Image (cartoon, helix red, strand yellow):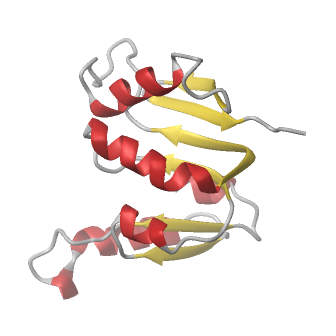
Amino acid sequence: MGLREAMPADGTLYLIDPFHLSRIPALNFLKRAARRAVGAAGSARTVWIESFSQDAARDWKSSIDFLLIDGDHREDAVERDWQDWSRFVAPGGIVAFHDARLFPSGWPTPDYGPVRFVDRAFRQLSNKPEWSIIEEVDSLVFVSRRNHA
């Protein structure tokens, strides 16, 4: 897991996933594979939150340096994740949107939810003056909260 490898050893990676897609919860292979993959890389602490994103956000209190939005890919769901979580991102912090950019030989299409949300929310600069796109790589779009002194 690249994120955990890139983090400082004293960092904490919070992973939110309900892991509900199993008929037999004790044999949830998606959950087991995810835990094995994350555990094999890096040394940062990992906290698993088995909940839907909107439920986890309700009780969240901590500041976030880096947030990856890569859940439900419907436009309204991407916007909801943004509304629920962006308020916790620290000044200078970064939010990455997955599958949010068209690129040569890529899979996202103009009607893809993350593409539509990022285009509407960040490519029209007057919409979010506190945020700006800082990098785009393949399907990923990175936005940063501006530091205000």
Relative to 13, residue 115 above or below: above
Q: Quadrant of residue 36?
A: bottom left
Residue 112, x across and y down, in percent: 26, 27
Please give left or right for residue 3 compared with residue 109 in the image: right
Please give left or right for residue 131 compared with residue 1 in the image: right
Q: Nearer the viewer, residue 125 or 32?
A: 125
Q: Nearer the viewer, residue 52 or 141?
A: 52
Residue 86, x across and y down, in percent: 56, 49
The structure residue drawn at horizontal position 35% and vertical position 73%, both measured from the top left corner, is: 51
Relative to 11, residue 98 above or below: above
The structure residue drawn at horizontal position 38% and vertical position 41%, both measured from the top left corner, is: 79
Q: Quadrant of residue 132?
A: top right
As drawn, the residue found furthest toward the right would be 149
Number of marks present in the image shown: 0
Please give left or right for residue 114 compared with residue 8 in the image: left
As drawn, the residue found furthest toward the left would be 23
As drawn, the residue found furthest toward the top would be 104
Please give left or right for residue 1 compared with residue 7 in the image: left
